[in-house]
């Protein structure tokens, strides 16, 4: 992760006041970010390795305020 946004929804999630994406505690905050793909879990994403991308955290156990997402 090169950069991750800090939106009001992220701050509300941290304080437990944002119900759109319930997160189990403990969790990593952040819903969107940018970075360089270092690995892919599937054949379709292999062509992205080494490329800069924008992305969103789509699962409750992931967050973009991390070194890797």
Image (cartoon, rainbow, N blue to C red):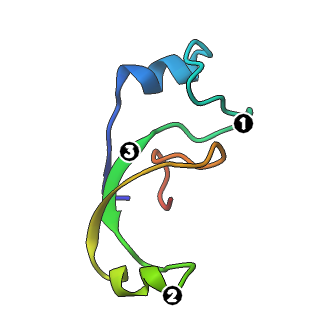
Give the x, y percent position of residue 18.
Answer: 55, 17
Q: Residue furthest front?
A: 44
Q: Residues within 10 Å of mark 1 (few under 14, many from 20)?
A: few
Residue at 38% x, 19% y is 8
**Residue, disc 1:** 26
Quick one: SS at disc 2? loop
Q: Residue furthest left?
A: 52
Mark identifier at residue 32: 3
Q: Residue at x 65, y 39 (%)?
A: 27
Position of residue 50 measured from the top left corner of the image (x, y, whole percent): 31, 82
Residue at the spot of label 2: 43
Q: Residue at x 27, y 77 (%)?
A: 51
Which-is-in-front pick, marks 3 and 1? 3
Query: Which quadrant is the N terminus positioned in?
Result: bottom left
Alpha carbon distance from label 3 to label 2: 23 Å
Mark 3–mark 2 CB contact (< 8 Å): no
**Rounded to the nearest whole Å, what is the CA distance between mark 3 and mark 1?**
19 Å
Quadrant of the image occupied by residue 2: bottom left
Res. 16 image quadrant = top right
Pinpoint residue 65: horizontal percent, then vertical percent.
46, 45
Sequence-wise, which precedes: disc 1 or disc 2?
Answer: 1
Q: Secondary structure at mark 3?
A: strand
Relative to 58, does residue 7 appear above or below in the rendering? above
Viewer-proximal residue among 56 and 63? 56
Q: CA distance from mark 1 to mark 2?
A: 31 Å
């Amino acid at each position: 992760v090169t950069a991750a946004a800090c939106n009001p929804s992220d701050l509300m999630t941290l304080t437990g006041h944002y119900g759109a994406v319930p997160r189990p505690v403990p969790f990593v905050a952040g819903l969107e970010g940018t970075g360089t793909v270092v690995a892919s879990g599937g054949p379709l994403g292999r062509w992205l390795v080494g490329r800069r991308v924008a992305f969103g955290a789509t699962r409750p156990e992931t967050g973009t305020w991390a070194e890797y997402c």
